[in-house]
Image (cartoon, rainbow, N blue to C red):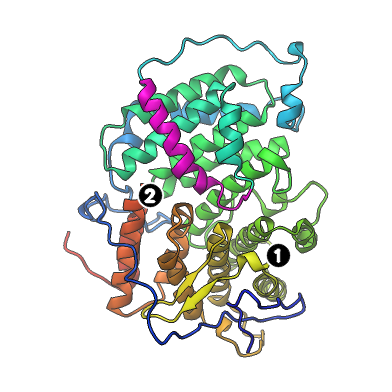
Amino acid sequence: MNDEDSPSHRPQKRPRLTSQEDVQPAPADPYPEPPWNLQSPYHLADYYHSPTLHPSDPFQSPNTSWTDGFSQDPGYLASQEELRCILFSLANSTAPTRVSSPDTAAHAEPDQSPPVPPHPPQQSISSDKQIRYLKNYITEIAPWLDMFDTQCTFRQQVPMLARTFPALSYAMLAISARQIERKNGVRNWFDSLELYQEAIRRLSPLLQLRDPKIVAACVLLCCLEMMSARAQDWRRHLEGCAALFESFGIHGFSKGLLQAVFWCYARMDLCGALISDGTQTTLLHPSKWLPGGCKEADAYRLFQSVKSPDMHANYAVYLCVKATELVSDRTKFLELNEDNGCTPDNFSARWFTLWNDLQCWLSERPSELLPVQTVNRKPFPHILFVHWAAISSTQLYHTACILLLKMMPKDVRLPRSPTLFPLWHARRICGISLANPHQGCLNNSIQPLWIAGQLFSHPSEHEEIIRLIQSIEAETGWGTCWRIRDLEIAWGVVRDT
């Protein structure tokens, strides 16, 4: 058996159907207790006493995460609707259908763009606070957004572009202020709301521009909305960005700023698909993730041609999206009688191809994406990575495998391997989050943890997962604990109301 977890492992090439991540038993435990000893500043009662869901709701999750009032604020709701209108107005513009690169935009002739009406500077946020929010953006927010980007576009390029583009500057400050409020349990959200509104106000006069900085600002504001949004509202927050990307022709290979912005959006779109529990795939169809004219059958070649750890990690995002697409198509074919071509034969062929692609993704990982150590611990192995992109991309590989194994066609025959057991993948999803405290990867692990967590039956496993999810919210400020009640429902836990 090959040692998949050793950095010296030589990846097997594409024809291989299965591969394994073997754990290395250690005579002594080199790791201390998991680092998740933080206590969430929020009370679980905030989750358990949420309004009861309507039976027809496709989501199990409660109607609220911990409530600080931000997402129900009338000013926020009005501004959110204004941003949504801006996004669809940009997408439906009669201007040329592709945005220019930042360099091209910077050298445009003065008369090529409409004049931007001047705005008085926003005064209510002190300069000290602005510096604090900017520092927090650089040290905490940008690493979330850059976790699949070794060029660190959001940490290095975006702040420089924001110096001459106020809408982008205010979007950066707004998401940073919102994260600080969420992380500290602050129920005074005036700074983030005011900065959010100012960013939108600065965007309004720019509707006729095709500037990449506008797209970056919109994605940052979308990310802010997701931080405390109800699960049922995720797709609504993403719809405008999806329309914008499709209209502008932005895809996963757009190069530079637009490519970084696309994959930041794409991970959120994938999370929205995973939240739907098999009823939907991404808003932006997987074919739109590729350059125009590129067939989905050519995706493997296209991703491999870039030859970078970042793009290999992005390929895992794409493959996981393809898994949600297959689950959704099969569900609609069987349960809604939708004529989408997902017949038994077609389904088996698509399933087998995607399973093969996933195992090739694992076996062909570049050395940067291999774990540096795997320790067999109970209840979950600890799998440590040094490359940020390796953390989430490996979790998404395991997530996609679980989705496929839960609907494995009866006529498929594969060599016996640990990869054929959903619980094997589920333990690794949990172990990766326990061993790798990168905040962006923790945020993106919530839906994989939900999919994995449903498979466990022992109380000790349940307790470990609950502690992990609570600690992610306390550490990052991202709304996560609503998934705890979902898991307890899946586990059959009955709580007094």
Residue position for label 2: 476
Chain part drawn in magenta: 126-150
Where does the C terminus fall, quadrant-wise?
Answer: bottom left
In the foreground, 296 or 250 = 250
In the foreground, 464 or 103 = 103
Q: Can you give x and y, in whole percent of width and height, for residue 248 in the image?
A: 71, 35
| Vertical order, 44 against 143 (above or below) | below
Choose the circle earlier in sequence order: 1 or 2.
1
Q: Can you give x and y, in whole percent of width and height, for residue 281 in the image?
A: 58, 56
Residue position for label 1: 341
Whether residue 337 can be seen here = no
Identify the secondary structure beneath mark 2.
helix
Q: Residues within 10 Å of mark 2 (few under 14, many from 20)?
A: many
Identify the secondary structure beneath mark 1.
loop
Query: In this view, which residue lies farthest toward the right?
Result: 293
Kind of residue at disc 2 = Thr
Please identify the dominant SS of the magenta region: helix
Q: Could you give the CA–CA distance between mark 1 and mark 2, rounded to whole angstroms? A: 42 Å
Q: Can you give x and y, in whole percent of width and height, for residue 426 in the image?
A: 46, 74
Determine the image quadrant of residue 108: top right
Whether residue 5 can be seen here = yes
In the foreground, 496 or 447 = 447
Residue 473 falls within the magenta-colored stretch: no
| Vertical order, 151 against 491 (above or below) | above
Measuring 36% from the left and 59% from the top, which residue is drawn there?
483
| Vertical order, 1 against 226 (above or below) | below
Kind of residue at disc 1 = Gly
Measuring 48% from the left and 62% from the top, which residue is drawn there?
277
Q: Residues within 10 Å of mark 1 (few under 14, many from 20)?
A: few
Q: Can you give x and y, in whole percent of width and height, for residue 444 in the image?
A: 48, 55
- C-beta proximity under 8 Å, tags 1 and 2: no
Where does the N terminus fall, quadrant-wise?
Answer: bottom right
